[in-house]
Image (cartoon, rainbow, N blue to C red):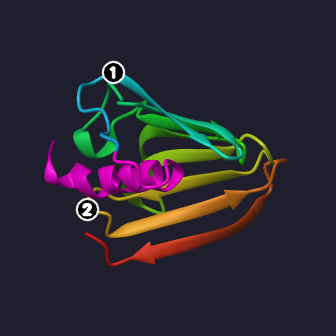
Amino acid sequence: MHEEVCNWSAVVFFVLSACMGGKTATAPQASGKEHTFTKETPQGKEQITVTEGEGGEDWCKKGMSWSYTGPQGAASFVIKGKTTYKGKEVCEGEYVDKTTGQKVVIYFTKGQEHIWWVIYDANGNKITEYELTGGG
């Protein structure tokens, strides 16, 4: 695993840890592998599936994804691949809340110096946009 992936992997690990109640989980390392993590809670069963992408550079692995199903609803995140946003080469990812239909499109540069979150409602109307700078 390359250094550029570490920040993004930390996000996936954080999501796994938060959703799994602090249970230690290991994100997949091999291309194309899928891992499913399950936890029983007083509210019901929670399940997270993580898939390592197959195309692109390590910092933007097209197809890398995770999905969650459980008592709180269902959501998914997938890396779409590299694109240009606001004049910068970025990686595009998409988070979808399957319960509400809301979507967050996330764009980030290779060193994560720039990150944009663009939030849409269930009808595809842009609600707001946030820009974070100075990462990396």
Left or right: 9 as drawn, with respect to 128: left
Residue at image mark 2: 111
Number of the label disc, if any, that sits on residue 81: none
Give how far across and how far down residue 11 sits, in percent. 39, 56
Question: Is 134 within the magenta?
Answer: no
Looking at the rendered image, the quarter that the N terminus falls into is: top left
The question of residue 19 being in magenta is answered with yes
Image-quadrant location for residue 112: bottom left
Answer with mark 2 or mark 1, whichever residue precedes in sequence: 1
Q: Residue at x 71, y 46 (%)?
A: 43
Residue that lies at the very extreme toward the bottom in this rendered image = 134
Which residue is rendered at x = 27% and y = 24% of the image?
A: 31
Residue found at the very far front of the displayed protein? 42
Q: Which residues are magenta?
A: 1-24
Q: Main secondary structure of the magenta part?
A: helix
- Which residue is under mark 1? 32
Q: Amino acid at mark 2?
A: Gly
